[in-house]
Amino acid sequence: MLRWTGWFVVATLAATAAYEFVLALRRTPSPSGAGALLLVGLIAMLVAGGLVFARVPPTGLFAPVAALFVTARFYAGDPYYGTSFRSYADGGIFPPTWIFVLLAAAVVAGVTTHLWRRTRPVESAVVLVLLMFTALFMGAGH
């Protein structure tokens, strides 16, 4: 049962990342329901943080897919500015360097999941917490 839950979390994070990526490519502001999408992404990351300790098969994918969601969200339009397009990258509290460091850390956490089975929960959980913090407070720099 937990194995399917893990794959559902990966699919949910991938779908939210794809949606944010499309918004970023189209350079359109996020719709008014963007808060619901953020909530779904945050809940999926929270569940992934719990499943990391249950050692389900897709554990190595949790942090990288969550990082893709946060990166895509960073370049999507901020709904605070209404109809004009302004992404979170254009003057938010997190610089692009922070986002790419998190993306690299998530990939490293995913790779080390497969190499060192004993430390798997630690690095993935730390990266997931940092990603949740970043996604939650990305729009705080208005």
Image (spheres, helix red, strand yellow):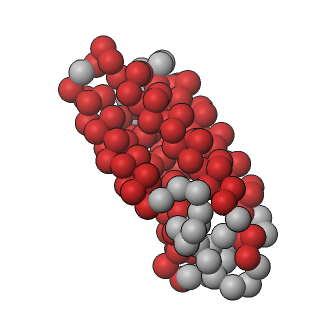
Q: Is residue 5 visible?
A: no
Q: Is residue 112 visible?
A: yes
User: Considering depth in this image, is 1 or 56 the residue closer to the camera?
Assistant: 56
Q: Quadrant of the C terminus?
A: bottom right
Q: Which residue appears at 44% of the width and 36% of the height?
A: 127
Q: Position of residue 77 (x, y in %)?
A: 62, 73
Q: Is residue 135 above or below residue 79?
A: above
User: Considering depth in this image, is 71 or 95 the residue closer to the camera?
Assistant: 95
Q: Which residue appears at 55% of the width and 24% of the height?
A: 50
Q: Position of residue 76 (x, y in %)?
A: 57, 70
Residue 105: image quadrant is top left
Q: Quadrant of the N terminus?
A: top right
Q: Is residue 14 above or below residue 87?
A: above
Q: Position of residue 119 (x, y in %)?
A: 32, 18
Q: Which residue is situated farthest in the left direction here?
A: 115
Q: How many marks?
A: 0
Q: Is residue 28 above or below residue 101?
A: below
Q: Which residue appears at 52% of the width and 43% of the height?
A: 131
Q: Which residue is situated farthest in the top direction here?
A: 118
Q: Position of residue 63 (x, y in %)?
A: 42, 40
Q: Which residue appears at 73% of the width and 76% of the height?
A: 81
Q: Is residue 41 left or right of residue 124?
A: right
Q: Is residue 26 above or below residue 11?
A: below
Q: Is residue 137 left or right of residue 18?
A: right
Q: Is residue 63 left or right of residue 110?
A: right
